[in-house]
Image (cartoon, rainbow, N blue to C red):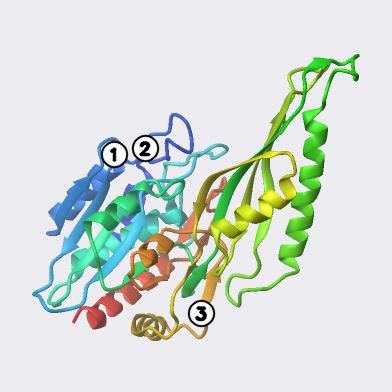
């Protein structure tokens, strides 16, 4: 087994389920300690930050005077419900199976191997292996307080396509209010669930308008959907409250403030709460770093990603950032695998990019 495949397997075999996403999840600490120790053994300068949910910064120092390159990957995974053997890394027909193989421990292995093998450059190559990307991105937010770089690659799974944009999101709650009463007393009761029906119709109509509206050339249209709903206390009572949780996906040019205005318009008497938001991301395609990675990767066209990533935070910190990662399937699914040949290709692109950018 080659070094990259072996390291990917070792990473997959360490449970790092996000504990804020899945109650009781193992968290990132065990994996972060493994990554830190691996980097130290391979001659990188290592800093570990965060207590119970640590992240790692590992740096291959250049000789000085060159531009720096940041390589960012997350340590955490989603849960493993329904998976037969999530932590038994299995290689079959050029694929490595297991939770996180595709999203994104294979790519984490790539940037570790790439950084450890780089020598003779003037600029620094900086690896950030971060906690909590799958929920609140506390790792990358903290990392950006520790490091700055002249450019960044986030090797999230893009199937060897060069992505320079992705959607953002706004998570929200809408709550309708009724009056609890015995089911036989409609003169006293007010049905909060029925009130929510009007809100759901408004969400459906907003989604129709969004998907028929302006399209971003790389990320498509915005969208909105209802995710969770709960209400009522028993069969024979009028429900006093109904709570809906939903998500509005945004495209470059849209803002959380604009989304809040949309939702208030459809909410009527319902109470609106914004519970989370992240901006969309778009890189300037004419930037020299984007042009460099496109040339090295042989990218005939640039694409957008439908999902959100920490690239938006890195770009928001003023660091030109692109997404370029491996092929595979099963992110957040019951069967997950990464294509091993694509990992080698991502490593090659990172090696060549660093050699030119950090020279």
Q: CA distance from mark 2 to mark 1?
A: 8 Å
Going from N to C along the chain, the mark reached first, 1 or 3, is 1
Q: Is residue 261 above or below residue 148?
A: above
* Residue that carries the numbered disc 2 in the rendered image: 27
Q: Nearer the viewer, mark 1 or mark 3?
A: 3
In percent of width and height, residue 119 lies at: 14, 73
- Left/right placement of residue 291 relative to residue 92 reads left
Residue 2, can we see it? no
Q: CA distance from mark 3 to mark 2?
A: 34 Å
In the image shown, does 340 or 20 lie closer to the viewer? 20
In terms of image quadrants, where is residue 251?
A: bottom right
Q: CA distance from mark 1 to mark 3?
A: 36 Å
Whether tag 2 and tag 1 are in contact, CB under 8 A, the answer is yes
Going from N to C along the chain, the mark reached first, 3 or 2, is 2
- Left/right placement of residue 70 relative to residue 247 reads left
* Residue that carries the numbered disc 3 in the rendered image: 302
The quadrant of the picture occupied by the C terminus is bottom left
In percent of width and height, residue 185 lies at: 89, 15
The quadrant of the picture occupied by the N terminus is bottom left
* Residue that carries the numbered disc 1 in the rendered image: 30
Seen at 82% across and 27% down, the residue is 191
């Amino acid at each position: 087994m080659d070094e990259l495949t072996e390291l990917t397997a070792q990473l997959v075999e360490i449970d790092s389920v996000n504990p804020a996403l899945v109650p009781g999840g193992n968290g990132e600490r065990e994996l972060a300690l493994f990554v830190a120790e691996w980097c130290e053994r391979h001659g990188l300068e290592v800093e570990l930050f965060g207590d119970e949910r640590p992240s790692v910064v590992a740096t291959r120092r250049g000789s000085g005077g060159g531009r720096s390159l940041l390589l960012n990957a997350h340590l955490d995974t989603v849960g493993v419900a329904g998976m037969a053997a999530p932590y038994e890394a299995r290689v079959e027909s050029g694929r490595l199976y297991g939770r996180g193989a595709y999203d994104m421990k294979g790519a984490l292995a790539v940037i570790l191997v790439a950084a450890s093998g780089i020598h003779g450059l003037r600029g620094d190559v900086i690896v950030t292996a971060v906690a909590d990307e799958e929920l609140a991105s506390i790792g990358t937010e903290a990392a950006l307080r520790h490091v700055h770089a002249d450019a960044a690659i986030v090797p999230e799974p893009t199937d060897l396509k060069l992505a320079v944009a992705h959607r953002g999101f706004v998570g929200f709650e809408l709550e309708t209010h009724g009056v609890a009463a015995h089911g036989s007393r409609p003169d006293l009761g007010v049905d909060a669930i029925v009130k929510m029906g009007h809100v759901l119709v408004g969400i459906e109509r907003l989604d129709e308008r969004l998907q028929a509206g302006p399209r971003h050339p790389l990320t498509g249209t915005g969208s909105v959907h209802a995710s969770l709903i709960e209400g009522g206390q028993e069969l024979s009572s009028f429900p006093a409250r109904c709570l809906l949780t939903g998500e509005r996906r945004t495209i470059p040019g849209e803002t959380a403030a604009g989304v809040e205005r949309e939702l208030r318009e459809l909410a009527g008497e319902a109470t609106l709460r914004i519970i989370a938001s992240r901006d969309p991301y778009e890189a300037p395609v004419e930037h020299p770093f984007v042009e460099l990675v496109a040339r090295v990767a042989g990218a005939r066209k640039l694409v957008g990603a439908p999902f959100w990533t920490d690239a938006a935070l890195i770009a928001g910190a003023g660091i030109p950032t692109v997404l370029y990662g491996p092929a595979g399937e099963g992110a957040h699914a019951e069967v997950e695998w990464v294509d091993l040949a694509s990992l080698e290709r991502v490593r090659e692109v990172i090696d060549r990019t660093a050699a030119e950018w950090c020279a």
